[in-house]
Amino acid sequence: MLAIEEHVELKPYNTLALHSVARYFFSLETIADLPAALAFARDKKLPVLMLGGGSNLVLAADFDGLVINNRLQGISFDVYGEEVKVTAAAGENWHQLVMLCLRNGYYGLENLVLIPGSVGAAPIQNIGAYGVELVQSFHSLTGWDTEQQVFRSLSAEDCQFAYRDSIFKHALKGRFYITEVSLQLSTRPEATIAYKALREQLTADGCLQPTPLQVADTVMAVRRSKLPDPAELANAGSFFKNPLVSAAALKQLQQQEPSIVHYPQPNGEVKLAAGWLLQQAGWKGKRVGNVGMHSEQSIVLVNYDSATGSDVLELASRIQQDIMQKFSVQLEIEPVVY
């Protein structure tokens, strides 16, 4: 018998600390209970929200469905030669997994330290930071397919990873529920320091040939200097995606803003820095009622005091309209809105 609760406040379960009440709530601690919980929702014709760390969502209203709080635990390592396959349950904390791998001498995730959230959420967003994306270390994942009514595994190709995107936001949205993720790491200490801000900080610290652990320490220091801790100031991390534009669009923008921050992409597109756009438009540190953009990192939207989901979306809409008017660039919200 599943221990399903009713009318549960979700404010403690999302890092933006937004008030929202779940009609039904279930704490998932055993994989075998997932099909039964989803069957409960199906029988009652309820939407389902799989909730991990709650760091990448905006709860815009009460959730009239079933929230499944993913608390699945377990980590295993399969070492063969210099290669290591790490498999972690979806409810594990992402940052703690990265640090555990580093302590064991398994490398490849060090640039992704201190990203809030659970392991199961990482593939959905194809999380990335400081020049590294999850897809670069991804091996496979397993989850429950509600259409096929089976647990099945997906490869990186199956997941259709893109910039902050995957098949779980599209064809498999609301259909596939991740239970564990496998990553391919290495015992070879090869640091990735191509990202400009990271390289500059390492150089300033006199660390010209950093170890993976030194990279992780530097990333954490940089992140802590710029990004507010959700436990101290409610936020969901980067709130807008860095927009992709064509090379022709960039040339037009450079006529208006010669110093615009941009990053050429392998496919010929150009990635713009959303934070730079917001700062240029005067949004850095700007507060509107109970919400605003952080004073140190303009891309982070923060909840100062009992903001609602409507407050958050209203501010986001104002910013999107302003950036479109000033730069003819469409900003896309990074967190998932419910």
Image (cartoon, helix red, strand yellow):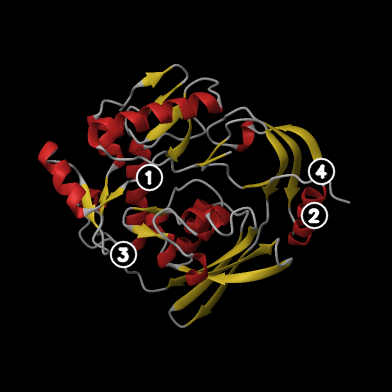
Which amino acid lies under the numbered mark 1 shown in the image of this protein? Answer: Lys
- Which label number is shown at residue 191? 3
Q: Residue at x 74, y 44 (%)?
A: 46
- Which label number is shown at residue 241? 1
Crowding at dot 4, Cα within 10 Å, few <14 / some 14-19 / many 20+, comes out as: some
Q: Report the Cα–Cα distance between label 4 and label 1.
A: 35 Å
Q: Earlier in the sequence, mark 3 or mark 2?
A: 2
State whether residue 205 appears in this view.
Answer: no
Which amino acid lies under the numbered mark 4 shown in the image of this protein? Answer: Ile
Q: Which of marks 1 and 2 is nearer the N terminus?
A: 2
Circle 1/circle 2 CB separation < 8 Å: no
Circle 3/circle 2 CB separation < 8 Å: no
- How many discs appear? 4
Q: In this view, does 8 lie above or below 285?
A: below
Q: Dot 2 corresponds to which residue?
A: 39
Can you give x and y, in whole percent of width and height, for residue 4 in the image?
81, 43
Circle 4/circle 1 CB separation < 8 Å: no
Q: Earlier in the sequence, mark 4 or mark 1?
A: 4
Q: Report the Cα–Cα distance between label 4 and label 3.
A: 45 Å
**Secondary structure state at the residue bearing disc 1:** loop
Q: Dot 4 corresponds to which residue?
A: 4
Can you give x and y, in whole percent of width and height, for residue 13 in the image?
62, 37
Task: From the viewer's side, name the closer residue of 193 and 268.
Answer: 268
